[in-house]
Structures are given as C-alpha cells and as structure tokens.
Amino acid sequence: MAITRIGSKRQITIPREALERLGLQPGDLLEVQVRGEVLHLVPQRVIPRDQAWFWSKEWQKKEREADEAITRGEVSQPFESADELLEHLHRNR
C-alpha cells in the first residue's frame, strides 16, 4: 500500500504504480467521492457536449446491433447513387 501526503496547496501525488495500472496521464480528470470516512478518486472521461448523443444507451444499443449484423454478414454492397440505394431498399422490403 502506498501512502501520499496532502501538500500546502491541497495537492496529492498519486503513486506511479497506481497511474500505470489505471492508464492515467497528467491532465486526466478524477471525480472525488467521499463515502463515510473514505476518499475515492474515480477516473473520468469527458465527452464533448456535441458528441454526447453518441454515448446514450439507446445509440450504443443500436451500435451493438449493427456490429452483430455486420458480423453475421447482413450487409449490402456499396451503391453508386442514392437512386440505386432506394431501388435496393424497395426491392428488399
């Protein structure tokens, strides 16, 4: 177990082994949680606001479904035009 000290500016040094184990880099964000008498530092990844939709549960579910369909070979060929795509969709309803 590593021990660290709180500095005069309320900063702490995270031991190298913990950083390496969690893949943390200088500048990464940590959420500070207090649970009873225990302080937890939880790594956080910030998603830009304009990309948050991509990480919604619904979108990720559809991404997994699409990946599974591709794995099963349920894909169509590339199309030369939008009209060709529409014809394909109408034929395969």
Image: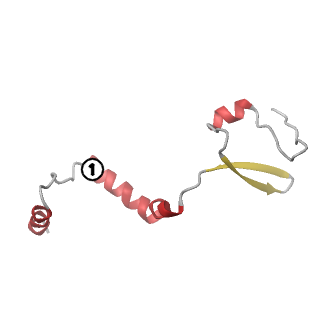
> Left or right of 5: which side holds 60?
left
Residue 66, position as x, y percentages in the image: 32, 56
Coloration of the structure image: secondary structure
Q: Which residue is drawn at 91% across and 44% down?
A: 8
Q: Check the image and report above or below for 34 versus 19.
A: below
Q: In which quarter of the image is the C terminus?
A: bottom left
Q: Which residue is drawn at 14% across and 55% down?
A: 79
Q: Quadrant of residue 64?
A: bottom left
Q: Residue at x 75, y 53 (%)?
A: 32
Q: Can residue 53 be seen in this view?
A: yes
Q: Can residue 56 be seen in this view?
A: no
Choose between 89 and 26: the one closer to the eye.
26
Q: Check the image and report above or below for 85 versus 15.
A: below
Residue 9, position as x, y percentages in the image: 87, 46
Choose between 87 and 8: the one closer to the eye.
8
Q: Check the image and report above or below for 70 versus 84.
A: above
Q: Which residue is drawn at 80% across and 56% down?
A: 35
Q: Which residue lies furthest to the right in this view?
A: 8
Q: Residues within 10 Å of mark 1 (few under 14, many from 20)?
A: few
Q: In which quarter of the image is residue 61?
A: bottom left
Residue at which label 1 appears: 70
Residue 55, position as x, y percentages in the image: 48, 59
> Left or right of 79: which side holds 67?
right
Q: In which quarter of the image is residue 6?
A: top right
Query: Does dot 1 land on a helix, a strand or a loop?
Result: helix
Q: Quadrant of the N terminus?
A: top right
The amino acid type found where label 1 is placed reads Ile
